């Protein structure tokens, strides 16, 4: 062999010694010569033997050992199997004296022999592989001699040999991977990863064979998971999975060259890995709720163990934790390489090193962390500081030199750092090494000093032999002579020193090891170290068929994989490759969605959208036909929308790119006419109109020109008919068959995309994705401009708004997510539009439609929805005027459909504000009043929350001169009828409420009643005679009809001050200060007003008489009557008023007399009610005194007048004659 191994197979199988002579082999168990013919059938023999010996499975410990010895002493059993296998391995020893490597001469040896051996070995393992692990001797042979030879032949220049080696390793992986953990790592690191890249000097053939082998491995469903779980997550191993994935990604990139078979091969490998992950998703995933690893406290990272490597509940979290540690260690290494102190502080901050550093933890960081600057490690270890010296000894203690030659041990030790140049540092380093080596492998060394001196001597020999500046080289004799008497005063065996001398001369001990974590060659010392480690390494984790670690793995390889597939797809020219790439993209999308890797899915969407050609400004004259001729673009387009429909839940920023594609298709006229229809709108699809006026549909009103013809219709068939049509004004040639076929392919592609499903099925999207989709629509629509935008921009904005409204209606249960963005967008449109256009129309009516549809279902945000209607009030006057009628019709519809769902004052305020505006709009007033009728008729939908608002709205309709006076009268009737609601609420409150609540409600109802009166008072001043007279009568009804309403005494006083007296004063002022042309027949109005005063006074007299200010109020009544008595109409006093006022006053006086309110009685000092009353009455009609008090003559009356004062004694009765009672009955006061 190329090196000597302590305790090798030649020693272990002493009984099986043999020699190779003239192509035959002799065995002490079988004296018959084994010819080549026999060897050709040896694979079958191995298989049969292994199957026969299957009973050895259950034996362990001493039983297994004794049983194995028994087997080894039986002829034709395991010994035969071992002999055959050993013979086959010996056929590979032809390389013992050859420099077989990447640049070796392939003609230097006959490849038939090793090919023959490799073929038989492959067959034997393929057929009998499952049984090999039951036989320790045979397994040991495969682990060491066979695998080491495979490593050597793996670098063969012969494609056949390399292919066969890879085939053997594939079978070994399949059957024995649990027993060959580190061997497999070495094979991939030192063979596959080196040969598959040209930078290591491999030929194209070698690269191709290595890549084919790697792809074969990748087709094993669990291969990459095994690599990740066992190597990438182990701090003592290299990142095999990551390296292989990166190799496949890089190899798929065609850099400055056309697509080759190698690129396609690498692509196949990548997609095999990805599809394996996608298939595991269907097997059930333990990763549905991925939780990141976090270290809360310090635990020695090199001591993290797994309780059960066979239970996923144990090894999965263990693997993740270990990978997290490994990744953080590598980040720490990066920090350390820039500043050692800060690097260690970083690791302390991440709980990978203790807060107070100890030598062992730092030593393990140096020992197990890849990527460290070996110069810095060497300087640290060689430092004379006490802590550094302790770290050095702990560092040396991490090595296993058991049964290892000194030169091999020293090589391994010095590979991990750069030996410092200073002699004192070298001494400290070699001293620590010598102690550790002597502790584990004393062999013929007398003490550790002997190991130290010999180590020094080996370093000097290495420098002497491999330094070009040393001209005179040390001979073997010189080396032996220099090491006399160092072994405790004795000499070391000459053979021992000679072996060391030749080993060092042949293979330099590298005191300046290579930096980085590349793919090193497998040297003899490294192989010995591998075998040592394999005895202590953690068990091989069998990952199984579930997606336990796919989240972590996919996160690592997704970016490079997407990039690689994209580049191949871009360069590909064949449909098969296109389809392979699309399958890969869909698998990536599936995995990203399953593991909630939204960023990856977004990146995938971005990459795919570029290939649709829809995002690029088209330079071709016929973009639709060009799209139909571009298979790559069509496949990419279908894939993009397939992903959007299947995995939309996990798309975030990618929605913007998808919408860009949709907008491009819209501009080309390739979308169905109703992409944005929502599920509940199917009944509206036939015609979306507002009282005969169609709402603009973006898809049928766009102003774009497409494929050379003016856009007349939209939708798939519309575009097709355009292509076929012949315009007499613009003659065109008949489309060719190729053009028709291209157009048909385009239409078929769009149909496959199911673009409408994205929006109609948006109700199933996850909340975050839905929110991002809405934001993307708003973003795509652009910011509305006050200046005139281009038809193209407006068309885009209308289309996006239509889609936004559709998804809002489709997601009524999640309106809270969408509403803020939708409202802001519509608000921007409304407030920035100064002229009527399709966009503002769509915004306003879309807003109304949203409110109509959502109010019945979302009472919790009803106020917010209704408040949004106030946006209509912010419309520019020109815009509002253009759409006022349609807006009012929609509001009317909304009210009729949802009145029972509008409960708050805030919501009603929005509705009534809109209705109030319509009162003065000719076209809209009818619909507005219709809605008000619906609310107020019979009090059907009047509530305490909307009473005042509705009364005020009715008042505005009553005052409005738009339309006939009849409508104003009807509005007044609505106001009058609303009193019944106040009465009903009072009655209901008495039955249901406590006294305290009743008191509060009574106050509220009283306020409403007073506001109603004030509203009617305003209408009483209307110029139109019919309206103001009806308003006075209505006011009278409302005030008189308040008997069943519990009103505090103070409310009546307010009523007279704010309503009755005010309206009389205002009417009097109008009659005197305005032309008869403006206010016709004011005389009749004044008569109605004074009658109202009298009747309300008499009706409320029992209540008013209780007030302390009654006297003042009564004087107010007398004053108004006196003024009305004197008023002049058309320049002279009114005869009718002259007749009416005394009669009304008489009725009031009689009522007051009857109730004992007005009576002559004695009192002390001050002006009396009696005196003041007659003072004013005499100014109106002096005869009334005797008519009311006939029993007193004037002299008596005058006499009494001077010595008595009036008093107010409610319970003192005054006699009233039968004729006076009759007079009161005529006035409607009694009886």
Image: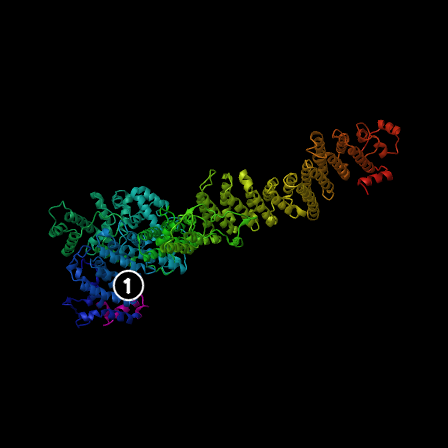
Q: Which residues are magenta?
A: 55-83
Tell me, yes or no, if residue 280 can be seen here: yes
Q: Nearer the viewer, residue 995 or 619?
A: 619
- Do we see residue 854 in this rendering? no
Element carrying mark 1: helix
Task: Residue 782: name its quadrant.
Answer: top left
Please, which colouring scheme is shown?
A: rainbow
Q: Quadrant of the N terminus?
A: bottom left
Residue 853: where, in percent of width, then height? 55, 50
- Which is more toward the observer, 1184 or 175? 1184
Residue 1063: x percent and y percent? 70, 34
Magenta region includes residue 59: yes
Q: Residues within 10 Å of mark 1 (few under 14, many from 20)?
A: many
The chief SS type of the magenta part is helix
Please tell me which residue lies in front, 617 or 531: 617
Horizontal side, residue 469 vs residue 874: left or right: left
Q: Is residue 867 magenta?
A: no
Quadrant of image for the C terminus: top right
Lateral position of residue 467 relative to residue 138, left or right: left
Q: Residue farthest to the front?
A: 728
Q: Name the foreground residue: 311 vs 124.
A: 124
Question: Does residue 1047 appear left or right of residue 747 in this picture?
Answer: right
Q: Is residue 1182 above or below residue 635?
A: above
Which residue lies under the disc numbered 1? Answer: 171
- How many callouts does the rendering have? 1
Q: Is residue 495 left or right of residue 1109?
A: left
| Residue 516 position within the rendered picture, expressed as x and y whole percent measured from the top left | 26, 48
Q: Quadrant of residue 500?
A: bottom left
Q: Residue 372: image x %, image y %?
A: 28, 47
């Amino acid at each position: 062999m190329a090196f000597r191994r302590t305790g090798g197979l030649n020693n272990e199988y002493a009984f099986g010694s043999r020699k190779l002579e003239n192509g035959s082999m002799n065995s002490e168990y079988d004296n018959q010569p084994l010819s080549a013919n026999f060897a050709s059938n040896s694979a079958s023999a191995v298989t049969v033997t292994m199957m026969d010996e299957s009973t050895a499975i259950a034996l362990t410990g001493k039983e297994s050992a004794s049983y194995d010895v028994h087997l080894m002493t039986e002829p034709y059993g395991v010994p035969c199997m071992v002999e055959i296998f050993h013979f086959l391995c010996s056929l590979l020893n032809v390389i013992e004296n050859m420099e077989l490597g990447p640049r070796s001469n392939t003609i230097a040896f006959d490849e038939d022999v090793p090919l023959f051996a490799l073929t038989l070995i492959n067959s034997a393992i393929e057929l009998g592989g499952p049984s090999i692990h039951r036989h320790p001797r045979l397994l040991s042979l495969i682990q060491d001699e066979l695998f080491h030879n495979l490593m050597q032949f793996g670098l063969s220049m012969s494609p056949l040999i390399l292919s066969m080696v890879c085939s053997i390793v594939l079978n070994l992986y399949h059957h024995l991977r649990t027993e060959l953990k580190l061997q497999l790592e070495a094979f991939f690191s030192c063979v596959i990863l080196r040969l598959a890249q040209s930078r290591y000097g491999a030929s194209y053939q070698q690269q191709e064979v290595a890549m084919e082998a790697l792809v074969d491995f990748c087709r094993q469903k669990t291969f990459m998971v095994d690599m990740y779980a066992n190597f990438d997550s182990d701090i003592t191993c290299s990142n095999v999975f990551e390296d292989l994935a990166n190799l496949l990604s890089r190899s798929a990139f065609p850099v400055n060259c056309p697509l080759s078979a190698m690129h396609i091969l690498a692509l196949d490998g990548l997609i095999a890995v990805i599809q394996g992950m996608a298939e595991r998703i269907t097997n059930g995933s333990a990763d549905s709720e991925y939780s990141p690893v976090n270290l809360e406290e310090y635990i020695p990272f090199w001591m993290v163990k797994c309780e059960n490597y066979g239970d996923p509940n144990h090894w999965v979290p263990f693997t993740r934790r270990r990978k997290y540690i490994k990744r953080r260690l590598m980040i720490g290494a990066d920090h350390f390489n820039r500043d050692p102190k800060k690097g260690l502080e970083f690791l302390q901050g991440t709980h990978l090193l203790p807060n107070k550093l100890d030598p062992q933890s730092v030593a393990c960081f140096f020992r197990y962390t890849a990527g460290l600057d070996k110069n810095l490690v060497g300087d640290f270890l060689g430092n004379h500081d006490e802590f550094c010296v302790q770290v050095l000894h702990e560092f040396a203690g991490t090595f296993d030199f058991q049964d290892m030659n000194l030169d091999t041990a020293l090589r391994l030790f010095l590979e991990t750092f750069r030996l410092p140049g200073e002699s004192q540092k070298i001494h400290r380093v070699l001293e620590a090494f010598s102690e550790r080596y002597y502790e584990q492998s004393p062999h013929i060394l007398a003490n550790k000093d002997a190991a130290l001196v010999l180590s020094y001597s080996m370093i000097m020999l290495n420098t002497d032999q491999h330094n070009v500046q040393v001209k005179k080289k040390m001979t073997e004799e010189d080396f032996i002579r220099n090491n006399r008497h160092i072994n405790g005063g004795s000499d070391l065996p000459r053979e021992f020193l000679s072996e060391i001398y030749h080993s060092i001369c042949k293979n330099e001990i590298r005191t300046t090891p290579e930096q980085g974590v590349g793919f090193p060659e497998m040297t003899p010392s490294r192989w010995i170290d591998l075998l040592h480690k394999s005895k202590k390494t953690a068990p091989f984790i069998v990952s199984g068929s579930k997606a336990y670690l796919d989240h972590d793995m996919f996160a690592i390889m997704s970016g490079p994989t997407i990039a690689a597939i994209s580049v191949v797809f871009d360069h590909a020219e064949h449909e098969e490759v296109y389809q392979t790439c699309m399958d890969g993209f869909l698998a990536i999308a599936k995995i990203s969605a399953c593991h909630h890797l939204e960023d990856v899915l977004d990146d995938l969407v971005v990459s795919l959208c570029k290939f649709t050609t829809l995002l690029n400004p088209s330079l071709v004259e016929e973009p639709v036909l060009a799209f139909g001729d571009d298979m790559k673009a069509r496949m990419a387009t279908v894939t993009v929308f397939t992903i959007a429909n299947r995995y939309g839940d996990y798309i975030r920023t990618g929605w913007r790119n998808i919408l860009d594609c949709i907008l491009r298709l819209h501009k080309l006229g390739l979308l169905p006419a109703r992409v944005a229809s929502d599920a509940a709108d199917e009944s509206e699809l036939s015609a979306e109109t507002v009282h005969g006026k169609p709402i603009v549909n973006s898809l049928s009103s766009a102003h774009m020109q497409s494929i050379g013809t003016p856009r007349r219709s939209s939708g798939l068939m519309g575009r097709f008919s355009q292509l076929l049509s012949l315009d007499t004004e613009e003659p065109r040639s008949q489309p060719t068959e190729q053009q028709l076929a291209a157009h048909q392919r385009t239409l078929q592609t769009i149909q496959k995309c199911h673009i409408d499903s994205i929006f109609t099925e948006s109700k199933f999207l996850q909340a975050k994705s839905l929110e991002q989709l809405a934001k993307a629509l708003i973003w795509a629509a652009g910011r509305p401009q006050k200046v005139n935008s281009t038809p193209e921009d407006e068309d885009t904005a209308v289309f996006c708004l239509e889609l936004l409204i559709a998804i809002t209606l489709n997601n009524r249960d999640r309106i809270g997510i969408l509403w803020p963005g939708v409202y802001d967008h519509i608000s921007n449109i409304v407030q920035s539009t100064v002229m009527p256009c399709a966009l503002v129309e769509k915004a306003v009516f879309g807003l109304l439609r949203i409110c109509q549809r959502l109010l019945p279902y979302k009472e919790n945000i009803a106020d917010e929805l209704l408040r949004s209607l106030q946006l209509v009030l912010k419309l520019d006057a020109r815009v509002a005027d253009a759409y006022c009628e349609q807006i009012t019709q929609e509001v009317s519809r909304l009210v009729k459909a949802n009145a029972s769902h509008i409960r708050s004052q805030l919501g009603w305020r929005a509705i009534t504000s809109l209705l109030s505006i319509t009162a003065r709009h000719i076209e809209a007033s009818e619909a507005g009043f219709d809605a008000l009728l619906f609310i107020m008729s019979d009090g059907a939908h009047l509530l305490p929350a909307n009473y005042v608002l509705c009364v005020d709205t009715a008042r505005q309709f009553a005052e409005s001169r738009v339309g006939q006076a009849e409508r104003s009268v009807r509005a007044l009737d609505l106001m009058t009828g609303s009193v019944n609601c106040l009465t009903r609420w009072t009655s209901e409150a008495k039955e249901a409420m406590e006294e305290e609540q009743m008191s509060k409600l009574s106050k509220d109802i009283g306020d409403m009643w007073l506001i109603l009166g004030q509203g009617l008072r305003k209408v009483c001043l209307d110029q139109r005679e019919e309206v103001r007279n009806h308003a006075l009568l209505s006011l009278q009804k409302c005030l008189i009809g308040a008997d069943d309403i519990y009103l505090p005494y103070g409310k009546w006083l307010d009523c007279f001050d704010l309503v009755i007296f005010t309206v009389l004063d205002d009417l009097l002022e109008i009659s005197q200060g305005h032309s008869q042309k403006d206010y016709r027949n004011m005389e009749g109005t004044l008569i109605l007003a004074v009658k109202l005063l009298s009747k309300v006074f008499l009706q409320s007299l029992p209540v008013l008489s209780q007030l302390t200010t009654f006297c003042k109020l009564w004087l107010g009544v007398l004053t108004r009557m006196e003024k009305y008595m004197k008023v002049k109409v058309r320049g002279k006093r009114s005869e009718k008023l002259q007749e009416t006022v005394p009669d009304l006053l008489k009725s009031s006086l009689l009522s007051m007399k009857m109730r004992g309110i007005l009576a002559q009685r004695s009192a002390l000092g001050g002006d009396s009610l009696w005196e003041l009353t007659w003072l004013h009455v005499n100014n109106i009609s002096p005869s009334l005194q005797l008519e009311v008090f006939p029993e007193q003559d004037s002299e008596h009356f005058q006499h009494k007048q001077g010595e008595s004062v009036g008093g107010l004694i409610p319970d003192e009765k005054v006699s009233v004659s039968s004729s006076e009672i009759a007079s009161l009955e005529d006035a409607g006061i009694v009886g």
